[in-house]
């Protein structure tokens, strides 16, 4: 069988599954016409890689292109507590929960335009170096930092996609990443931490006079400032929002000095599309639902899950339904089919009975 047809069958399995996706189950889906060994060899071949993700994403990017495309970069951790540890499935610090989690940590580049999100790039945080902590406990370390992976994903986007801004949260809102985007003729809007020091003019910067960004009184306005490590000015602003019973401020920085407060916050708001992406691959395309145990087969499955996400986005365009609505539609169709099969099995065979 042609490898592309085999990949399509694997995607079909991800889109229609409601539990773990196994090679044996996929073989059964084809009525045994495709052996489980073929699916196993497909995952082990490494053909479903980052280049495959981009190849599958490109047509949907072209279909949804507009003047308001943004590239959203973010990372996520999917827990895999019962999978054997390796350089991919290992312990990572989760800033959301404030603890270490055993699982896969990955950075994704999400193309977003006209309400449609398309994963166009992914980098996995791997930790092949085994060492010991200060307390003598065995730990793993990566050869590449998350910020280096961030710049790799952005570089892929800058080379292959036409977009207006790179969006990222404060974890990636450092000077090195800002400088990378600026040097490569791109535009960014990054969240930055409230204690970030800035100068009010180039002269203040040269003379070492810096103030904390939270003391600028930015509510409802933007202003141009100088960051110590950068050779170019940035526009900064803040957005106040409710945080339970309290209020909190989100601080943003951009190298587009023409952006107003309203424009900057409205564009940055698009970053939340990445949360929909994470939720959908984890709930609808079986991202964590594979018993694979080797790094290559695990990566292949994770990337295939992201490709399957694009098919749900395509269905959203065609049917004007959410991923969860379409998954529920498939679930109901499967239940109806199973019910019909059940009644066939329960109905007495009258010919044999006589």
Image: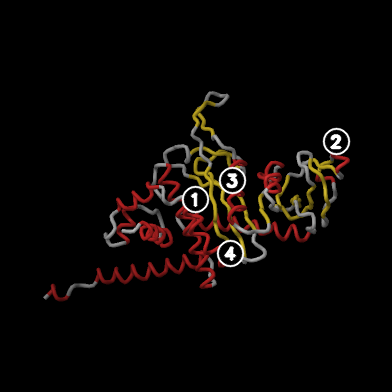
Give the alpha-carbon distance from disc 2 to disc 4, as whole Å.
Answer: 45 Å
Element type at mark 2: loop
Compare marks 1 and 2 and give the one earlier in the sequence.
Answer: 1
Against 132, is 250 above or below?
below
Where is mark 2, residue-wise? 208
User: What is the secondary structure assignment of the residue under circle 3?
Assistant: helix
Q: Earlier in the sequence, mark 2 or mark 4?
A: 4
Marks 1/3: CA–CA distance: 12 Å
Residue located 11% across and 76% down the image? 354
Task: Name the spot of residue 261 as percent of width and height, x first.
Answer: 79, 58
Q: Nearer the viewer, mark 2 or mark 3?
A: 3
Q: Which residue is mark 4?
A: 116
* Residue on which disc 3 sits: 152
- Neighbourhood count class around disc 4 (C-alpha, 10 Å): few under 14, some 14–19, many 20 upward: some
Report the residue marked by disc 1. 50
Of callouts 2 and 3, the N-terminal one: 3
Q: On the rendered image, what quadrant is the N terminus found in? A: bottom left
Q: Which mark is residue 39?
A: none
């Amino acid at each position: 069988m042609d490898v592309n047809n085999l990949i399509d069958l694997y995607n079909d399995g991800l889109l229609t599954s409601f539990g773990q996706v196994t090679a044996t189950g996929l073989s059964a889906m084809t009525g045994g016409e495709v052996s489980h060994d073929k699916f196993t060899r497909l995952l082990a071949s490494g053909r479903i890689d980052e280049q495959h993700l981009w190849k599958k994403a490109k047509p949907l990017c072209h279909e949804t292109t507009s003047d308001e495309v943004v590239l959203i970069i973010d990372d996520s951790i999917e827990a895999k507590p019962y999978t054997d540890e390796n350089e991919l499935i290992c312990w990572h610090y989760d800033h959301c929960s404030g603890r270490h989690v055993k699982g896969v940590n990955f950075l994704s580049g999400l193309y977003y335009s006209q309400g449609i999100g398309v994963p166009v790039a992914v980098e996995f945080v791997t930790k092949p170096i085994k060492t010991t902590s200060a307390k003598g406990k065995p730990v793993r370390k990566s050869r590449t930092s998350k910020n280096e992976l961030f710049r790799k994903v952005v570089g892929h986007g800058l080379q292959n996609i036409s977009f207006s801004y790179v969006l990222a949260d404060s974890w990636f809102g450092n000077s090195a990443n800002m400088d990378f985007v600026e040097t490569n003729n791109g535009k960014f809007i990054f969240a930055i931490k409230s204690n970030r020091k800035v100068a009010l003019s180039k002269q203040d910067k040269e003379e070492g006079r810096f103030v904390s960004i939270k003391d600028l009184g930015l509510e409802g306005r933007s202003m141009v400032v100088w960051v110590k490590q950068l050779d170019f000015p940035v526009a900064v602003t803040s957005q106040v929002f409710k945080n339970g019973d309290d209020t909190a401020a989100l601080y943003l920085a951009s190298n587009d000095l023409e952006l107003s407060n309203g424009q900057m916050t409205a564009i940055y708001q698009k970053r939340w599309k990445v949360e929909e992406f994470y939720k959908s691959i984890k709930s609808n395309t079986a991202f964590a639902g594979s018993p694979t145990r080797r790094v290559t087969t695990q990566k292949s499955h994770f990337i295939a899950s992201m490709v399957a996400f694009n098919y749900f986005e395509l269905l959203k365009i065609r049917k004007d339904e959410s991923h969860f609505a379409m998954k529920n539609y498939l679930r109901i169709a499967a239940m109806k089919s199973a019910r019909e099969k059940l009644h066939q099995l329960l109905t007495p065979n009258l010919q044999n009975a006589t």
